[in-house]
Image (spheres, rainbow, N blue to C red):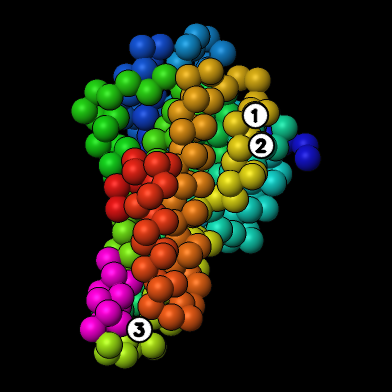
Amino acid sequence: MNTQTLPAQTTGQFPLNHGYAFSSNGVGREIDAVTAADWLKHQHDKDGEFIWLHFHDLPGVLEGWPLQHVRLPDAFADTLREGSRSTRITHVNENLIAVLNDVDYDFARKEPLNVATLWLNVGVRCLMSVRSLPLRSVSQLRQAVEMGTPFHSPMALLIHLLQEEADVLVSSVRTAAQTVNEVDATLAADRLPKRPKLGGIRRDLVRLRRLLAPEPAALFRLVNRPPNWVREEDVQSLRQSAEEFSVTLSVCRPLELEPRNPRSIRQCHDDEGACPRHRHVRF
């Protein structure tokens, strides 16, 4: 797909929520829309620096990009229009297009599943993100930046967000496993569990997995064939995230299956504890 330079608007029209410019030492400082526009205009003079622009107004972004020097794949605008929500990272030309999610969920089912989606385009000098609703992962990343945590590339910011999402998935699977353990105890006491509760857990796990977990094979392909501007340390961090997602999914899938007898439930947890790969997931 071709890239295009999208039309400019005045800085007063920027639907910019937050902006950060990062120096060559990885430390970021918050900037406003006017500074962001000037930085982008002179970005080729900014050796080792990059920028993160975070937008909150999806319709405003789609009506016409406000920064004339941001070159984006057509596929990114298509992704925004489609409102795609499943987590994924795809390589388009020299860019990465990512869809990430934040989920607020209670397995007690007292409230419905709340999903906030973040769409990102990652290039060598610019990370552009657009949100549907506020995300905890973005707030945590902003806090890290403002506390002086160094990030040496746009890819490092993306990986931080991806790791936050992995933590949400791990926490959800851990909670589900604890609930299934309670059902296991009920079965061991020769009492029938509430099957609708088990069915609800399985359905919710399937939905959470689809929302929060990128396809492992696709993620490992990206690890093995990243864009040429991605730094080696970022590739290694991405590999670690891919492995953690893979391990978490290996624990999640048995919990999604309907147990035929008490042994099948117990076996799921025995396997989880016995496999060394699962120890770092901390169930």
Report whether 206 appears left or right of 62.
Answer: left
Query: Which SS class for mark 1?
Result: helix
The 10 Å Cα crowd at callout 1, few under 14, some 14 to 19, many 20 or more, is few
> Residue at horizontal 65%, vertical 29%?
224
Report whether 75 appears left or right of 20.
Answer: right
| Residue 207 visible in the picture | no
Q: Earlier in the sequence, mark 2 or mark 3?
A: 3
Magenta region, main secondary structure: helix
Q: Position of residue 48 (x, y in %)?
A: 47, 12
Q: Is residue 15 above or below residue 71?
A: below
Q: Nearer the viewer, residue 250 or 25?
A: 250
Whether pointer 1 and pointer 2 mark residues with C-beta atoms closer than 8 Å, the reply is yes
Query: Which SS class for mark 2?
Result: helix
On residue 14, the disc is: none
> Residue at horizontal 52%, vertical 43%?
120
Viewer-nearest of labels 2 and 3? 3
Q: Earlier in the sequence, mark 3 or mark 1?
A: 3
Q: Which residues are magenta?
A: 178-189
On residue 224, the disc is: 1
Q: Quadrant of residue 219?
A: top right
Viewer-nearest of labels 3 and 1? 3
Q: Which residue is mark 2?
A: 221
On residue 197, the disc is: 3
Mark 1 → mark 2, Cα distance in angstroms: 5 Å
Q: Quadrant of residue 132?
A: bottom left
Mark 3 → mark 1, Cα distance in angstroms: 41 Å
